[in-house]
Image (tube, coloured by chain):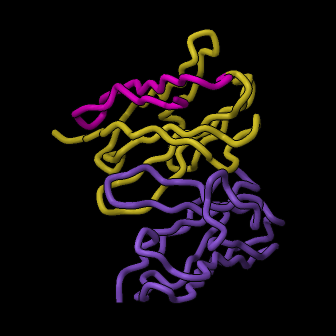
Chain colours: A yellow, B purple
Amino acid sequence: EVQLLESGGGLVQPGGSLRLSCAASEFTFSSYGMSWVRQAPGKGLEWVSATTSSDNSKYYADFVEGRFTISRDNSKNTLYLQMNSLRAEDTAIYYCAKDLYGGSAGPLDMWGQGTVVIVSP
Amino acid sequence: DIQMTQSPSTLSASVGDRVTITCRVSQSISVWLAWYQQKPGKAPKLLIYKASSLGSGVPSRFSGSGSGTEFTLTISSLQPDDFATYYCQQYDIYSTFGQGTKVEIK
């Protein structure tokens, strides 16, 4: 079954760091762009970052402000999001999602179940 | 930044109703717009991409239209499984989601 499985979420203090991972299976991971999308408690979807299939172009939402880094290891079929200088407002469910194409933040046709990040003292 | 405005924020409807949700964009994005359905506690599901192309396995009662700055998602005959929150997404310049439209039972 085609799937995406996120991990790495948890409770972290303000100013701390976390590294999220997203393991892909049953599709040619290296052929598709990938994104991270988050959803704060009771709120809507918010696009965070995207990378192209070859990882040579990366895109970030303005609110990231240089704090997050997206990357991927196509040999391991895994997408990453390194999050530094975390703030309370980064508290959310973080979803990884597959692009329908090889590009960047295009239509997202497959989503993981999400991993929860809580930023609190 | 591209701003997305969905309307209405909440919509009360009955099974069998025709439902239309609008997404207005702050600048022209051609047809680079998608629609998603999300149910509580679940990940979103792609319904429509490129403004009017139906996602894989999506029932034909869902349709999308529009171009430029104004787009609509239509459900031709609302079914019990369709009560959910719907989001539009532009992917012309990076990506932005609308704030969502909750379709609830009337």
| Residue A77 x/y as whole percent | 58, 17
Observer-nearest of B103 and B80: B80
| Residue B102 x/y as whole percent | 42, 75
Q: Which residues are magenta?
A: A1-29
| Residue A87 x/y as whole percent | 33, 43
Image point (56%, 82%), residue name: B77
Left or right placement of residue B29 versus residue B9 in this view: right
Left or right placement of residue B26 versus residue A118 in this view: right
In this rendering, is residue B84 above or below B95?
A: below
In this rendering, is residue A64 above or below B17?
A: above
Image point (74%, 26%), residue name: A31
In this rendering, is residue B57 above or below A66?
A: below
Q: Which quarter shows the C terminus of chain A?
A: top left
Image point (56%, 77%), residue name: B6
In the picture as drawn, the residue positioned furthest to the top comes out as: A75
Observer-nearest of B29 and B10: B10
| Residue B82 x/y as whole percent | 46, 71
Occupied quadrant, residue A72: top right
Tell me, yes or no, whether the highlighted magenta stretch contains residue A7. Answer: yes
Observer-nearest of B20 and A47: B20
In this rendering, is residue B53 above or below B22?
A: above
In the picture as drawn, the residue positioned furthest to the left comes out as: A121
Occupied quadrant, residue B26: bottom right
Left or right placement of residue B6 versus residue A45 in this view: right
Q: How many marks?
A: 0
Image point (71%, 62%), residue name: B33
Tell me, yes or no, whether the highlighted magenta stretch contains residue B8. Answer: no
